[in-house]
Image: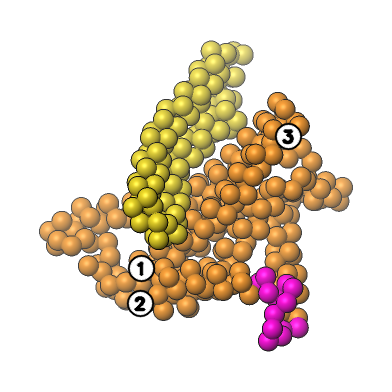
Chain colours: A orange, B yellow
Amino acid sequence: MTHPFLFLQWITDQLHLHIGEHVTYTWLVMAILIVVAFLASRSLTLVPSGVQNLMESVVGGIEGLIEETMGEEGKAYFPLIATFALFILVSNLLALIPGFYPPTANLNTNIALALTVFVLTHVVGIKKHGFGYIKHFMGPILWLAPLMLIIELISHLARPLSLSLRLFGNMYGHEVVLMIFLALVPLFLPIPMMLMGVLIAFIQTFVFTLLAMIYIAGALEEAH
Amino acid sequence: MEFFAWCVMAAGIGMGLGAIGTGIGQGHAIQGACEGVARNPGASGKILTTMMIGLAMVESLAIYVFVVAMIILFANPFTDQVLELVTK
C-alpha cells in the first residue's frame, strides 16, 4: 500500500540484505542532513550566501520558536529539538518524491522518537526537582493525591502513544490516499493531494516539536 | 467468510463515525479562530499557530480510528484463527 518501487529497497534486495525499508531510508535522511550541514558550515562567512543562508534561517527559526515556548531555559534543549524538527521534516517531505519512502510512515521510527521525548522529560524532571518531582503527579489537593497519581500516570503513559500514532497515522494515511487516487485517476488528480501532503509534512513537524517542547517545559516548571 | 465482510463494514462505519466527531470539533475550532481574526486582525499570526496545534490535536482522534481501521483491514490478529475454523 506504499510506493510501488523503492530504489533503496531494490538495492538491498540485489545485495540479499534483509533490512527494512524504513531503516535504509532513515540512513538516507541522515546522509542528506549530514551533507547539507557540512556544505552549510564548510566555509562560514560573515555575510551568508547559498546553503549557509538557508540553514541560518532554518536554525534561527527553530531557535526563536524554542525561546517563545520554553523561555531562556529551553536553550539547553536546542540540539535535540532542532534534530527532531530537521529529521521529521526531511523524512516527511521525502514522501512526495516517487521511489522514496518516508521513515515516519513506519510506526517503529515514530515510537523511537516519541520514547526519546518520554524518557527525556522524566530524566529532566528528576534532575531538576529530585524526589520532589513526584509533586507533579499529585495534584493540588493532598487527600486527592492517590487518585490524581493514577490519572496522571495514565496521561503521561498516553503521551508517547499519541505522539507516535499521530505522526504515523498522518504520514501513512497520506501515502494510502495518494496510492488510491493514483490507482483511480493517475493523471492530475493526485496533485492537489500532494499539495496537501506538503502542508501535512510541515504541520506535523511543527506539532511534534512543539509538543516535545511543551512536555519538557512542563517537567521543568515548579509543581502547583 | 462472513467474518471478513463484517471486518470491512466495521472499518468503514468506524471511520465514518470518527470523521463526524472530528469534523464537528475542527469546525468549532475554525469558527473560533475566524471570529478572533475578524475582531482583531493584528493577532492573526498567533491565532493561526494556536489553531493549527488545536486542529492537529483534534485530528489525532480521527487518526486513531484510521489506524484501527487499517489494523482491522490489513493486520487483523484474528485472521489465522478464523481461516483455521473455516477450513475445519
- In this view, the residue in front, A139 or A153, is A139
A180 is higher (above) or lower (below) than A99: above
- In this view, the residue in front, A157 or B21, is B21
- Say left or right for A116 vs A55: left
Residue A177 location (% of width, % of height)? 62, 35
- Say left or right for B13 vs B33: right
Q: Which residue lies at the image location 39% right of the left edge and 47% below the top edge? A: B34
Whether label 1 touches label 2, CB < 8 Å: yes
Q: Amino acid at mark 3?
A: Phe
Q: Which residues are magenta?
A: A43-55
Q: CA distance from mark 1 to mark 2?
A: 9 Å
- Secondary structure state at the residue bearing disc 1: helix
Q: Which residue lies at the image location 70% right of the left edge and 26% below the top edge? A: A184
A119 is higher (above) or lower (below) than A98: below
Please identify, in this view, whether the residue under mark 3 or under mark 1 is nearer the observer: 3
Q: CA distance from mark 3 to mark 2?
A: 54 Å
Q: Which mark is residue A219?
A: 1
- In this view, the residue in front, A195 or A81, is A195
Please identify, in this view, whether the residue under mark 3 or under mark 2 is nearer the observer: 3
Closer to the N terminus: mark 3 or mark 2?
A: 2
Residue A164 location (% of width, % of height)? 51, 51
Q: Chain of mark 3?
A: A
Q: Which mark is residue A188?
A: 3
Q: Amino acid at mark 1?
A: Ala
Closer to the N terminus: mark 1 or mark 2?
A: 2
Q: Can residue A208 be spotted in the picture? A: yes
Residue B76 location (% of width, % of height)? 55, 29
Q: Which residue lies at the image location 75% right of the left edge and 81% below the top edge? A: A42
| Residue count near mark 1 (Cα–Cα under 10 Å), binned few <14, some 14–19, many ≥20 | many
